[in-house]
Image (cartoon, grey):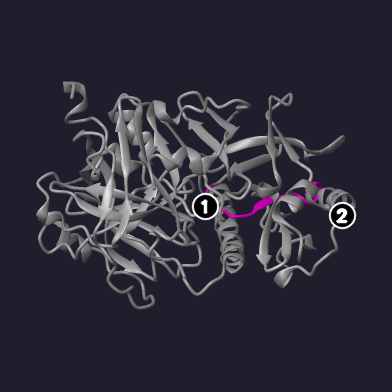
Amino acid sequence: MPATMTSRALLLVGVVLTAHKFLCTAYVGGDGFSVEFIHRDSVKSPYRDPSLTAPARVLEAARRSTSRAAALSRAYAGADASSADGAVSELTSRPFEYMMAVNVGTPPTRMLAIADTGSDLIWLNCSNGAGAPGLAAARHARAPAPAPAPAPPPGVQFNSANSTTFGLVSCGSGACRALPEASCADSKCRYLYSYGDGSQSTSGLLSTETFTFADDQGTRGDRAMRVANVSFGCSTTMIGSFIGDGLVGLGGGDLSLVNQLGADTSLGRRFSYCLVPYSINASSVLNFGPRAAVTEPGAATTPLIPSEVKTYYTVDLRSVKIGNKTFAAPQEYPVIVDSGSTLTYLANELVDPLVKELTQRVKLPPAKSPEELLPLCFDVSGVGEGQVAAMIPDVALELGSGGGATVTLKSENTFVVVHEGTLCLAVVALQFPPVSIIGNIAQQNMHVGYDLDKGTVTFAPADCARSSGSLYI
């Protein structure tokens, strides 16, 4: 491996995740690296509920999406109330959808963390700190406010005392200043991330470690890429019930994984994913570096626009089209592109005419919406899946000023089965102004690439199961 890619080269976590007994693989190459993007309901997820039917899982995801949208909205409100740069301390990923494996430390500890485009900080569950100088003392440096009982021990904890590359970050560092809420503990940087309702939080010391991404399957040689001194939160105190071994922030803020890779490697600040539909038993794929380039036919690129919260990837939605009908969005209408939200949330001015037009065009009997959660449902009992898809018209999103990019949503991007025989629209009226969201159902079977250096996001239709199949069987 070239010298430029040794101490500060990149890492690729290709993992037989022994602690969870689920297979996670990764591909490393000169054009970047790729890891599995595991949906929480995947057969590879330790959080899958085997008692649920496929439609029931979709309905549960829709319920989580409502909580997620509320959290994103609170973050926006916090940004408006706090500072011009939109710094907020609220962690918005409680209702998560995707995970990735990470190898941390020397020797590495394999962990399965939430992968979140709506958060920045990387934080991992750490042991109580008894083995690391300064870590145990810092744990008690500031007494927490009265709160619910701490969460039970997580599945995997990182023990910094066992790693030769672990370090602590000083209070005066740029990384510490990038935290929305930080304090000092023996001159070391202590962080606190809390949920908006105060019921859950994580705190600990901002630390540095070596992250390693490697092909553990041995089918592509013994190459491994390492990134030294990745800043992350070593979480020693947790209130509430967190799922996963930590969180990898993929947002636009300075402490996110994509920004740190851009600063410490030659890969640039870019990543992409290709989301496999819920109905397909395969992992999605998450790409970094040149591998994140979206080059498929029909690719549509639109500028990222400034957001109240720097973390969020926001684009300008100009209109929604069905056939020859165009429904204009409110003027200067920002929409967050978010992999962690299941549903798509748009203003009433767009959803109401969309529902009316689909009601007229789709020749299927109406059905009752479960829990009145979704605005339009049809009875598809006895109708073949292919027949249903042919009856649903495409919906086009026109993005960017001047209609610079058109993203076409097929039936699988707009409708989901939430009960046996019940098909419902996965686009709902905005419940938590001012946040509008393009969710992950709308992004299925699309290669979506974010380039922070160019300030763009690109969408292209793709067969995501086929794209990831050669990597993740």
**Which residue range is magenta in the image?**
339-350
Left or right, 389 with respect to 173, comes to: right
Label 2 element class: loop
Residue 21 lies in the magenta stretch: no
Question: Residue 177 location, x and y as percent?
Answer: 33, 42
Residue toward you, 460 or 340: 460
Q: Which residue is the site of mark 2?
A: 363
Question: Residue 443 location, x and y as percent?
Answer: 59, 44
- The reply to whether discs 2 and 1 touch (Cβ–Cβ < 8 Å) is no
Q: Residue furthest right?
A: 360
Left or right, 27 with respect to 307, comes to: left
* Three-letter code for the amino acid on which mark 2 is drawn: Lys
The answer to whether one can see residue 305 in this image is: no
Q: Residue at x 70, y 66 (%)?
A: 373
Label 1 element class: loop
Q: Which residue is the site of mark 1?
A: 340
Q: Residue at x 52, y 41 (%)?
A: 464
Q: Residue at x 10, y 56 (%)?
A: 161
Quarter of the view holding residue 162 = bottom left
Closest to the camera, between mark 2 and mark 1, is 2
The answer to whether one can see residue 351 in this image is: yes
Question: Residue 355 location, x and y as percent?
Answer: 82, 53
Question: Residue 13 location, x and y as percent?
Answer: 28, 44
Residue toward you, 157 or 277: 277
